[in-house]
Image (tube, rainbow, N blue to C red):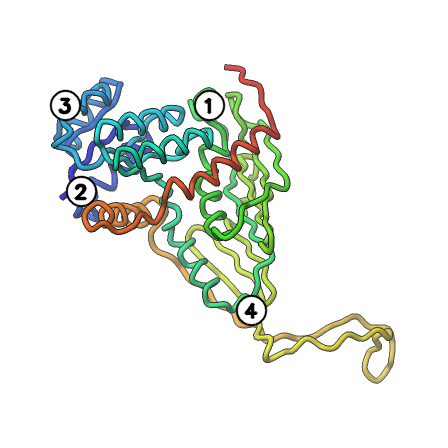
């Protein structure tokens, strides 16, 4: 089993990574060290994992030969600097999202990984979320035809007053929630063109800090669909997570169900253009275009989530990389595009730092 150290025992370090490592689904990793600056969290970690606990990540340096992987789930603003320091001290690193605030920091991490021969792996596990895997399967089948628009909404109604409300801590919807839809959107966008930001808007609504809790993002590219992404804490009517519009039909999805319907153009070819006014049969009264298509409808109820089965799939990928030399499926180079878009979004919508 690979020996793991976890830095941070908050909502991510304990409740996502730690929960997975302690679960029956995990057969590949053993937690051998935990770091947290809070004494009560260290005491709890000692009980839950039965391993040594430390107050600072630098204490891990003396145990390099006893650790195969470090999970960096510190405050968002610390991610890049701590990940780089860990690699320089010989550790392979999984780093929580956001990987960094600035593109230059991601580029630094890529260079550091190359110089040290260590791994930097962004924790973008939503790429393995059951709904996203099913969406990709339906798209690959081709039944929907050419996609014109992806609408992705990670929205609900909530109020926040924790550290992730702070710009100084790299908080806000774009940096906290945004890595999920942005990573998925850029994966669907593909790697054969560069995304072009068309519009963005950030706002504060139900948040105690100075970061945004509303974000609207539109981007596209040459010969690409439109991507319409919304991250909002102001939508009391839970929207569909995904709505996809395509030439032969549509798809909609939430976390637990995917539905899609399409027609076969071979069964119903598009009628020829008529430039003379249309008339109703027999009466020749004015008429609109109208037809009855044979809709094929399917749906799929899903098991698992982005925080259970997707985490298992992610760590399966990391295990294959570290033990078999398999390529990383989620890389810092891929996430660099996300961070570049984030930078442009924040530059176009400057919010003053108040705290």
Residue 86 percent across, percent down from the top left = 26, 28
**Residue in the image at 45% along x and 25% along y:** 170
Please state which of the two labelled residues, at mark 3 or mark 4, is closer to the viewer: 3
Relative to residue 285, is residue 83 drawn left or right? Answer: left
Q: To which residue does mark 4 refer?
A: 262
Work out how far the residue at label 1 is from the one at label 4, CA to CA, in angstroms: 44 Å
Please state which of the two labelled residues, at mark 2 or mark 4, is closer to the viewer: 2
Please state which of the two labelled residues, at mark 3 or mark 2, is closer to the viewer: 3
Question: Badges 1 and 2: C-beta atoms under 8 Å apart?
Answer: no
Question: Badges 1 and 4: C-beta atoms under 8 Å apart?
Answer: no
Whichever of callouts 1 and 3 sits on the residue coming sooner in the sequence is 3
Residue 319 percent across, percent down from the top left = 22, 47
In the rendered structure, find residue 62 and report the number of the disc placed on it: 3
Work out how far the residue at label 2 is from the one at label 4, CA to CA, in angstroms: 44 Å
* Image quarter in which the N terminus is found: top left
Work out how far the residue at label 1 is from the one at label 3, CA to CA, in angstroms: 37 Å
**Residue in the image at 49% along x and 29% along y:** 172
Whichever of callouts 3 and 4 sits on the residue coming sooner in the sequence is 3
Work out how far the residue at label 3 is from the one at label 2, CA to CA, in angstroms: 21 Å
Label 3 sits on a secondary structure element that is: helix
Q: To which residue does mark 1 refer?
A: 161
Q: To which residue does mark 2 refer?
A: 29
Whichever of callouts 1 and 4 sits on the residue coming sooner in the sequence is 1
Relative to residue 34, is residue 279 drawn left or right? Answer: right
Q: Residues within 10 Å of mark 1 (few under 14, many from 20)?
A: few
């Amino acid at each position: 089993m690979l020996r793991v150290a976890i830095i941070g025992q908050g909502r991510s370090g304990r409740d996502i990574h730690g929960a997975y490592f302690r679960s029956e689904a995990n057969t590949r990793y053993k937690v051998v060290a935990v770091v947290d600056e809070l004494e009560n969290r260290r005491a709890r970690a000692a009980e839950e994992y039965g391993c040594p606990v430390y107050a600072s990540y630098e204490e891990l340096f003396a145990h390099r030969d006893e650790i195969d992987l470090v999970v960096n789930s510190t405050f968002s603003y610390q991610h890049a600097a701590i990940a780089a320091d860990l690699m320089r001290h010989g550790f392979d690193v999984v780093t929580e999202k956001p990987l960094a605030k600035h593109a230059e920091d991601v580029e630094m991490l890529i260079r550091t990984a190359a110089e040290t021969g260590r791994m930097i792996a962004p924790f973008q596990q939503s790429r393995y979320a059951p709904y996203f895997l099913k969406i990709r399967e339906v798209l690959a089948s081709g039944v929907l035809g050419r996609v014109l628009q992806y609408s992705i909404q990670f929205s609900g109604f909530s109020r926040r007053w924790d550290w992730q409300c702070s710009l100084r801590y790299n908080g806000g919807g774009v940096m906290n929630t945004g890595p999920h839809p942005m990573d998925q959107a850029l994966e669907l966008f593909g790697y054969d063109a560069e995304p072009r930001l068309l519009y963005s808007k950030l706002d504060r609504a139900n948040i105690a800090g100075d970061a945004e809790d509303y974000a609207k993002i539109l981007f596209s590219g040459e010969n690409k669909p439109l991507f319409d992404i919304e991250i909002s804490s102001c939508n009391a009517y839970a929207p569909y997570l995904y709505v996809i519009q395509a030439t032969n039909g549509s798809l909609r999805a939430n976390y637990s169900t995917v539905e899609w319907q399409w027609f076969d153009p071979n069964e119903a070819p598009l009628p020829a253009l008529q430039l003379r006014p249309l008339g109703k049969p027999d009466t020749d009264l004015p008429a609109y275009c109208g037809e009855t298509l044979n809709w094929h409808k399917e749906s799929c109820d899903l098991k698992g989530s982005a925080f259970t089965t997707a985490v298992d799939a992610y760590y399966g990928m990391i295990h294959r990389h570290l033990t078999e030399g398999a390529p990383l499926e989620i890389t810092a180079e891929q996430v660099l595009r996300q961070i570049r878009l984030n930078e442009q979004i924040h530059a176009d919508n400057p919010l003053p730092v108040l705290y």
